[in-house]
């Protein structure tokens, strides 16, 4: 048998080592993919119903024209149900990218390690206060402020709208407020968080007891509250105060026919809670590079400028222009309430349980 030289053996071992690095990733490289990174013909985007309802055939047309990759949308219900689905299927994900996890569910998603890290170069245009994950497992795409809205026609100089959260318990506003259940509604949870941040861990319970005593009404979700019980704008009810969004008044203007000169609803900026929505690459995708390109596309100015009139929230990219209706009819809170996602994750279930005992005994 011929004896191979040490040089040949060294070359063979070097080649084998290289194959191992390609297959398994470099030692200590947590970002190395665990599955092949194949080019995609189609990427699947898991999102919530609200985004799917606002998307059209044109939404991802620029991305497809640029990359040759089409985008298929899979809906997962509301934001909470969508996150649950992503967690339950994380070992065999139903999509390549998830969009729509907000700060109220962010810690749960991150703790379950359902995302791969990706730092988009377009983050330079995103305000630092929206970038809640320093490891860049998720990318901020939009934000909205959950605020009290009121029916302008229901108030007058003799009975002005409440100035903020505290006045909602005033007997003058008895029977006027409808809110969403925080156990079933994202804006309902945001409003609960706003009251906890404002009145503290030991004070928010009494505040809600005062609201109950003032004939508070609770419904399951935003549609039921805004279109069913609210008296303003497109609402058909008799309650002139509702938990909605700072961007609801421009929607009332845009969708009214004929278009009014003034919005029939307005925003109370005290006590608004800022929600940030994120996108992330789902761990287990076989198309990591193209999935990253899709996340980057969601931050492009081209896509970001479609956000306000498609989903009535604000673009995260500060360079995106706003439509005139958002400038004219939206009241932007100067100092919206926020809460650390870790604190939300720690307290959410207990707060909802305690709220339920107080409000829905």
Image: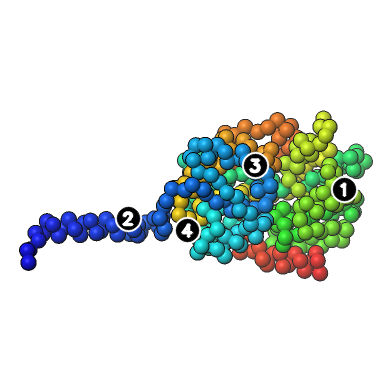
Q: Are marks 1 and 3 in contact (CB under 8 Å)?
A: no
In the image, residue 347 sits, relative to residue 55, either above or below, namely below
Q: Is residue 209 left or right of residue 142?
A: right
Residue situated in front as seen by the camera: 74 or 213: 74
Distance Cα–Cα, label 4 vs label 3? 27 Å
Quarter occupied by the N terminus: bottom left
Q: Which sits earlier in the primary sequence, circle 4 or circle 3?
A: 3
Disc 2 or 4, which lies upstream in sequence? 2
Tag nearer the camera, 1 or 4: 4
- Residue at the spot 61% in from the left edge and 44% down from the top edge: 142
Report the Cα–Cα distance between label 3 and label 2.
39 Å
Query: Helix, strand, or loop for circle 3?
Result: loop
Residue bearing mark 4: 284
Q: Earlier in the sequence, mark 3 or mark 2?
A: 2
Q: Which of the labelled discs sits on residue 236, or is there none?
A: 1
Instruction: Between residue 348 and residue 86, name the one nearer to us.
Output: 86
Horizontal and vertical percent for residue 240?
86, 47
Mark 1 or 3, which is nearer the eye?
3
Label 1 vs label 3: CA separation?
28 Å
Disc number lying in front (1 or 2): 2
Label located before the other in sequence (1 or 3):
3
Which tag is nearer the camera, tag 3 or tag 2? 3
Q: Residue at x 65, y 44 (%)?
A: 55
Where does residue 266 sit, x and y in percent of width and height? 80, 40
Which mark sits nearer the N-terminus, 1 or 2? 2
Place of residue 89 in the rendered image (x, y in percent of width and height, measured from the top left): 55, 63
Q: Where is mark 3, residue-wise? A: 56
Q: CA distance from mark 2 to mark 4?
A: 17 Å
Which element is circle 1 on?
loop
- The crowding category of the residue bearing disc 1, from other C-alpha atoms within 10 Å (few below 14, some 14 to 19, many at least 20), is some
The location of residue 28, given as percent across then percent down, is 35, 59
Q: Label 2 belongs to which residue? A: 22
């Amino acid at each position: 048998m011929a004896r191979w030289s040490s040089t040949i053996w060294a070359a063979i071992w070097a080649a084998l080592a290289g194959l191992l690095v390609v297959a398994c990733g470099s030692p200590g490289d947590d970002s190395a993919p665990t599955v092949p990174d194949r080019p995609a013909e189609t990427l699947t985007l898991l999102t919530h119903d609200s985004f799917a309802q606002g998307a059209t055939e044109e939404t991802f047309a620029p991305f497809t024209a640029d990359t040759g990759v089409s985008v298929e949308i899979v809906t997962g219900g509301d934001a909470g149900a969508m996150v649950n689905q992503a967690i339950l299927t994380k070992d065999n994900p139903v999509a390549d990218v998830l969009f729509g996890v907000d700060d109220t569910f962010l810690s749960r998603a991150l703790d379950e390690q359902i995302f791969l890290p990706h730092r988009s170069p377009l983050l330079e245009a995103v305000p630092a206060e929206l970038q809640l994950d320093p490891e860049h497992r998720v990318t901020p795409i939009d934000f909205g402020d959950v605020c009290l809205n009121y029916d302008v026609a229901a108030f007058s100089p003799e009975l002005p709208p409440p100035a903020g959260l505290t006045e909602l318990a005033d007997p003058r506003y008895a029977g006027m407020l409808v809110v969403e259940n925080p156990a079933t509604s994202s804006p309902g949870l945001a409003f609960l968080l706003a009251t906890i941040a404002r009145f503290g861990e030991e004070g928010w319970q009494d505040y809600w007891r005062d609201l109950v005593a003032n004939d508070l009404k609770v419904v399951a979700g935003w549609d039921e509250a805004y279109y069913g019980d609210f008296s303003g704008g497109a609402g058909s009810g008799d309650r002139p105060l509702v938990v909605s969004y700072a961007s609801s008044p421009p929607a009332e203007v845009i969708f009214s026919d004929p278009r009014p000169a003034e919005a029939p609803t307005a925003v109370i900026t005290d006590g608004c809670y800022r929600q940030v929505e994120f996108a992330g690459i789902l761990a287990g995708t076989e198309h990591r590079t193209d999935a990253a390109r899709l996340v980057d596309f969601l931050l492009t100015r081209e896509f970001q400028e479609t956000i306000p009139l498609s989903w009535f929230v604000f673009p995260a990219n500060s360079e995106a222009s706003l439509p005139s209706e958002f400038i004219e009819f939206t009241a932007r809170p100067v100092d919206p309430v926020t809460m650390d996602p870790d604190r939300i994750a720690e307290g959410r279930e207990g707060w909802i349980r305690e709220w339920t005992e107080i409000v829905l005994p």
